[in-house]
Image (spheres, rainbow, N blue to C red):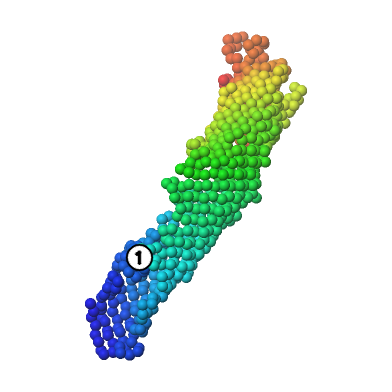
Amino acid sequence: RIAFSYDGKSITMKSFSASWRGLPIKGSGTVSGLGTDEASLNLSGTTGKINASVLEGFIPALSGNKPAGDIEASWKLSGPVQKPLLALDVKSADLTLPGPVSLENVAAFASVSLPSQNTGATLKVEARADSASCGDFSITGLTGKFSTGKGFLRVDDFSGKLLSGNLDASGIINLAKEKGGKPVIDLDCELSEGDLAAFSKKGFPLSGQVFGSFKVTGPLDGLSVVFEAGSPELSIQGYMLKSVAASGTAGMEGVMVEAFSAAIGEGSLEGKGSVSLSGESPAAEFSVIGTGLDLAYLTREVKAARNAGIEGAVDVSLKGSLAGGAWAGNGEVFAERLSAYGFTAEDVYAPVSLEGKLAKIQKAQGSVYDGSLLANATLDLGTNVWKIDAEVSGFDIAKAVSAAFNIGGQITGTGTLKASIEHGKSQAMPLTGQGRFTSTGGEISGFKAVEAITAAYGGTGIRYNRAESHFSLGGNMITLMPGSTITAPPGDPLYRYMMVDGILGFSSNLDLHCSGNLNVQALNIFFGALEGLLGTETLDAQQMLQNFLGGFLGGMSRKDFRDVSFDITGTWDKPIITKLKIAVPEKGPDPIPTSEEDENRKGSQQKINIEIPTGGSSSGESVGDQIRQQILQQIFNGQD
């Protein structure tokens, strides 16, 4: 349909509509210079909103692969009649191309010189799109310049954002030569400043920047990629690597990493592997060798490892495979020195195996402060729950204590520790376990209060014959079980035994109950030892007991053994000794004279609650004055 006018030299078309290869066209314009060599066209119009499937008639590569979506186009045909220039401006909010590739907010401008003969035309296209996606793969901010020749599309300049980094590409797409055929791609690509954190949103715990070059070849439904990639530093589930480099190939069937290398601290890691995607579930094979791997660097972003203060350098070799969701493999780990929680192990050798969803270490061996280490461990690769069963026998207590704690004194002896610890099973209490500790033939010495008084008994500290404790671990607390005991050597002038049970909270309150058979004249020594072991300088027990026992229990013999009990509460910064009870002997004179009125007195114990001053108060009273006032007040008030 056409409405026009003719003046002998030109045709003016007020409006016309037609269909070209299924494409509806509307327009208007003029054809001037008719009958001369300068005849020219000046026509323009629109297509209106049409289905993208009509493009199949214009682009051979789309034959048999109809695009989907709505497009709108405006056009202009101008220039000499013999060789006019066709300009197209195409827009689509949502367009799907073979692959399938989904494009959003597409805008393209194309121009082509229409030939006077059927020899083909060169089409130049400038295009942009907000995003393009194919499965989980997406690129944003696309811009490109393209040109076509007979049977091909040349990518002259293409750029976009991939993994938040800059992607540049160029190459050729050879168009299908027959209906239903697939375009064949040959592109060279460069990626810079890619952010691997995008994988974390898809369940892969990665972070860090990546760069690389890759060549993409093959048909759309069977692409093959040859790549070389690297990263200055990346994190895999919190474990850190630097100077990472990898090369290999990738395709629809899977990925082959032909070479992989990375640095972990000053150590190096090398490996290779493959991932197959052709079966019902992914399959993989790998092998790695590491030398001098720095554990502190490797685990610096892993909170549990950071809190444990893990340090050391390890050598690793491991081979494994994944099939049907189950791992299989074996290897070994060796370290000259490993540290955790302040303790150090040396010459550690650990055989490693992969079984199902578990990584296992069985019969790991090493040396811990001159003692022997034997350990088994498991790690659930799906949940990250780990469990360790370990025994350290015959280790030097003095070396272990001085390495892990700063208590201002010394504890000697030969120890054995058996423990079973599990981490990650419960979020409310991530660290749980139980164990048994024994020590023989040692001494507690070096604390000022201990040295001052043990000298009077011809010794240098509190000696012990055997110490034994069963304990449990829950979160940030160790619970000493009832029956935890320290026994004195035969004939010791200070005590016969002490028993302790209760809670040692690392970031919470203390709640310990202590009892034993002690020489009450030497109680200063035990409270002095507690002062050192608790790491506080505020427990002024020496002056307290010198005044208290010197007056209140005056007249006792140099060796007066009594059953004594007390509790330790409060915090590490402000420990409090309460419920101090000293049994009066059943026989012998009452050290406290009584009157006839006191004949029926039933009390055989004196209990005193003492709150240890911590300083910082504006009161002018000395520590001794404060303690003395507490004792006198409780005695006169008759507190039990």
At horizontal 54% and vertical 50% (from top left) the residue drawn is: 273
Q: Residue at x 35, y 65 (%)?
A: 179
Which quadrant of the structure image shows residue 24? bottom left
Q: Is residue 2 left or right of residue 611?
A: left
- Rendered residue at 34%/70% (across/down): 58
Count up the numbered dots.
1
Whole-percent x, y for residue 247 in the image: 55, 56
* Residue position marked by numbered label 1 in the rendering: 179
Give the image location of residue 597, x and y in percent.
Answer: 60, 10
Looking at the rendered image, the quarter that the N terminus falls into is: bottom left
Q: Is residue 628 above or below residue 184?
A: above
Residue 315 appears in view: yes
**Residue 221: x, y in percent?**
41, 58
Q: Nearer the viewer, residue 586 or 290?
A: 290
From the viewer's perspective, tell me whether residue 494 is left or right of residue 359.
right
Q: Residues within 10 Å of mark 1 (few under 14, many from 20)?
A: few
Q: Quadrant of residue 57?
A: bottom left
Is 307 or 72 nearer to us in this picture? 72
Is 466 left or right of 326, judged from the image as shown?
right
Q: Is residue 114 visible?
A: no
Q: Residue at x 64, y 35 (%)?
A: 365
Task: Note whether 353 is above or below 48 in the view shown.
Answer: above
> In terms of image quadrants, where is residue 536?
top right
Give the residue type at disc 1.
Answer: Lys
Q: Indicate the secondary structure of the residue bearing disc 1.
A: loop
Near-viewer residue (563 or 139): 139
Q: Nearer the viewer, residue 407 or 13?
A: 13
Quadrant of the frame with the C terminus: top right
Q: Position of residue 319 (x, y in %)?
A: 56, 44
